[in-house]
Amino acid sequence: MKSRVSLLLITAVLMFSCRKNIQPEVYIEHIEKGSSITNIAQATLLANVANAMQAGGPAAAVEFCNLNASVIIDSLNSLYNCSISRVSIKNRNPGNALGSSSEKKLWNYFDKGLLSDTVVQQGGNLVYYKPIRTAMPTCLKCHGVPGTNIEPATLGKLNSLYPRDLATGYSLNDFRGLWKIEFKKD
């Protein structure tokens, strides 16, 4: 009981501090926009990765992501007037590492299951965060355990394209990263 009360208190303090200076209606609007944009980004990436995987297997999907994921995200950035990225402590692309100390603190709250989607103010911008999980067995073909889920050819492609890859070793439904949507000022 005491731990449950502590958890609720921590969550309330965190939610208040993350939302400070954000009006409730603005917070809700950006939660809805962020959720919609991440759902579209995720679906777009997954559809393209599935096509690459069907055409040439997981190694082809890794190569496709290396060459095309940024282009796909950039086109969505323009369409929605925002900056979409994915961040993680176990990133594949070094450009997707966690940035600020406040982002690292947020990561810990998501990792402990204390947060789901949230919007925070960073500088003058509102930033939406949403957890990414290894939600399908197919995810493990590139993000699972080498030698168990990841085939040697795929591991070789990962090692050649991402020599400092940290984004493996996951199991199904593990917390793997965060979608990060930075909304530009109007």
Image (cartoon, grey):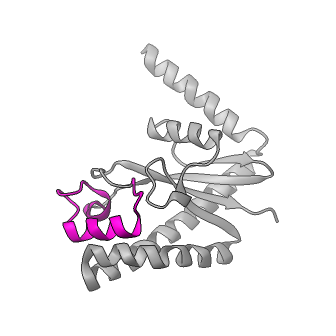
x%, y% of residue 53?
29, 78
Q: Report the residue at 67% width, 53% height from top.
A: 127
Q: Quadrant of residue 36?
A: bottom right
Quadrant containing the N terminus is top left
x%, y% of residue 134?
34, 56
Q: Tell me where the magenta segment starts and ends, as one range.
A: 137-166
Q: Report the residue at 26% width, 83% height from top.
A: 56
Q: Pick out the residue farthest to the bottom.
A: 55
Magenta residue check for 165: yes
Q: Nearer the viewer, residue 83 or 43?
A: 83
Q: Is residue 74 left or right of residue 110?
A: right
Q: Is residue 74 left or right of residue 53?
A: right
Q: Quadrant of residue 104?
A: top right
Q: Pick out the residue farthest to the left.
A: 148
Q: Nearer the viewer, residue 171 or 40?
A: 171
Magenta residue check for 148: yes
Q: Nearer the viewer, residue 25 or 111?
A: 111
Q: Compared to 176, does 102 lie above or below?
A: above
Q: Compared to 47, does 155 lie above or below?
A: above
x%, y% of residue 122?
73, 48
Q: Pick out the residue farthest to the top.
A: 2
Number of labels in the image equals 0
Q: Report the residue at 69% width, 34% height from top.
A: 17
Quadrant containing the C terminus is bottom right
